[in-house]
Image (cartoon, rainbow, N blue to C red):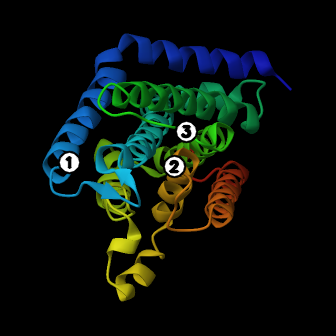
Amino acid sequence: MNLRASASIYRFEMNRTARTVLQSIISPVLSTSLYFVVFGGAIGSRIQEVDGISYGAFIVPGLIMLSLLTQSVSNAAFGIYFPKFTGTIYEILSAPISYGEIVLGYVGAAASKSIILGVIILATAALFVPIRIEHPFVMIAFLVLTAVTFTLFGFIIGIWADGFEKLQLIPLLFIMPLTFLGGTFYSISMLPPIWQKVTLINPVVYLVSGFRWSFYGTSDVPVTISLAMTIVFLGICLTVIWLIFRTGWRLRP
């Protein structure tokens, strides 16, 4: 396995983040902090506790997941789209490097950025409210699994997109609304019974629920189901990427 080639792609992508630190790190952190101040302050003054947890602390896992999902998709999509846009993707495809090593470099870098961002947001939230993590290893597992899974999903979007507007189409039309409707700022148990069942169609519910369980030991969905759903989506994304490189879809001129 040519790990040096994967490492080169990884370093290039991480260096690109360092050159655009304002939009890559600072902007998402500020946006999430504003979410926290607005929702935690405005709604938290009316809803004191949810499942025995202060509202400000309750929304922290959801806010981290919101940022993790959007940034994972965005980082990976832009990361693979720019080589397509400039034409350097053909140099990469013709180099003595396997498709798996290409994916490892791009997805590894995008996932690393998202995980770093998630940790920064967690540290920022700790300045506002007291946070406890009852299951730290489960929290790390969900953080890494979610980052890798949605980075792979973003990688697929970046290959599919044939214009800059399409890079934002899926995140704006689907990822953001599903995240808001996935229990980010509320517990599913607060909804009417019929809507509780309808909400379970939303895959983000399982991610937010499992991640929140790792913090406070409370969840809307059993943590094993949340973990299983995440792994299933990961498997689907890996299969789609394998088919893309196998067929050359959207990669060949």
Q: Residue 178: x percent and y percent?
A: 37, 62
Mark 2, secondary structure of its residue: helix
Q: Quadrant of residue 235?
A: bottom right
Q: On screen, 230 above or below 39?
A: below
Locate the N terminus by quadrant: top right
The tag on residue 133 is 3
Residue count near mark 2 (Cα–Cα under 10 Å), binned few <14, some 14–19, many ≥20: some
Residue placed farthest to the right in the image? 1
Locate the C terminus by quadrant: top right
Q: Residue at x 33, y 24 (%)?
A: 127
- Going by the numbered disc 3, the residue's amino acid type is Ile
- Disc nearest the viewer among 1 and 2: 2
- Going by the numbered disc 2, the residue's amino acid type is Tyr
Mark 3, secondary structure of its residue: loop
Closer to the chain start, of discs 3 and 2, is 3
Q: Residue at x 31, y 56 (%)?
A: 49
Q: Residue at x 38, y 49 (%)?
A: 58
Q: Measure how far apart labels 1 and 3 are at the Cα level.
A: 21 Å
- Going by the numbered disc 1, the residue's amino acid type is Phe
Q: On screen, 54 above or below 13?
A: below
Mark 1, secondary structure of its residue: helix
Q: On screen, 202 above or below 156?
A: below
Q: Measure how far apart labels 1 and 2 are at the Cα level.
A: 19 Å
Q: Residue 170: x percent and y percent?
A: 37, 56
Closer to the chain start, of discs 1 and 3, is 1
Q: On screen, 187 above or below 12?
A: below
Q: Residue 19: x percent and y percent?
A: 38, 11
Can you identify the residue that label 1 sits on?
A: 39
The tag on residue 216 is 2
Q: Measure how far apart labels 3 and 2 are at the Cα level.
A: 6 Å
Horizontal side, residue 66 vs residue 137: left or right = left
Q: Residue at x 33, y 61 (%)?
A: 186
